[in-house]
């Protein structure tokens, strides 16, 4: 039986160039507006909401519409089986359009840029 020493070959962890690449790809692929993040990891770490001119950009508006579309799809995924189950368990309510209108999901607003704009307006 022989014991051999493991080699120290591997990735150079002191180089952050690959990290920068994957960070930028993450931001682009998630469709989150780039102005929410510091694109340069080694650069200034100022928070984008820290300034007084926190206004909603076109990117923020487009991202808000994207989230709304996802929420509408998710709403249909949740409410369709619920409506089918109500119709199966209570057939007398199957023709009730009023009940179908009252079934819904209300999402909380969590857009940080909208909140920052409200804070700026209150100042």
Image (cartoon, helix red, strand yellow):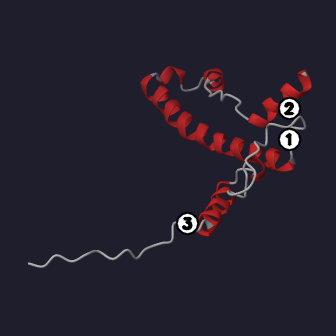
Q: Secondary structure at mark 3?
A: loop
At mark 2, the secondary structure is helix
Q: Distance between the Cα atoms at labels 3 and 1?
A: 37 Å
Whichever of callouts 3 and 1 sits on the residue coming sooner in the sequence is 3
Q: Nearer the viewer, mark 2 or mark 3?
A: 3
Contact flag, marks 1 and 2 (Cβ < 8 Å): yes
Q: CA distance from mark 2 to mark 3?
A: 39 Å
Sooner in the amino-acid sequence: mark 1 or mark 2: 1
Note whether 114 is above or below 25 in the view shown. Answer: above
Q: Secondary structure at mark 1?
A: loop
Q: Are marks 3 and 1 in contact (CB under 8 Å)?
A: no
The location of residue 16, given as percent across then percent down, is 60, 65
Tag of residue 117: 2
**Mark number, residue 14:** 3
Q: Residue at x 65, y 63 (%)?
A: 20
Question: x%, y% of residue 15?
Answer: 58, 68
Name the spot of residue 21 as percent of width and height, x first: 64, 66
The residue indicated by pointer 1 is 56
Counting residues from the N terminus, which is met first, the one under dot 2 or under dot 3? 3
Residue at the image point whose x is 59% and y is 41% from the top: 74
**What is the distance, in whole Å, between disc 1 and disc 2 at their CAs?**
8 Å
* Residue 121 rendering spot, x and y as whole percentages: 91, 26
């Amino acid at each position: 039986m022989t014991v051999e020493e493991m080699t120290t070959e591997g990735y150079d962890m002191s180089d952050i160039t690959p990290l920068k690449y994957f960070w930028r790809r993450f931001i682009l692929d998630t469709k989150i507006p780039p102005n929410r993040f510091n694109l340069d990891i080694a650069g200034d770490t100022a928070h984008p909401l820290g300034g007084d001119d926190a206004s909603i950009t076109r990117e923020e508006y487009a991202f808000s519409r994207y989230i709304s579309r996802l929420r509408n799809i998710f709403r249909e995924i949740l409410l369709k089986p619920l409506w089918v189950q109500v119709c199966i368990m209570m057939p007398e309510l199957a023709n009730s359009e009023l009940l179908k209108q009252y079934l819904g999901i209300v999402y909380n607003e969590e857009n940080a840029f909208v909140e920052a704009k409200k804070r700026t307006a209150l100042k």
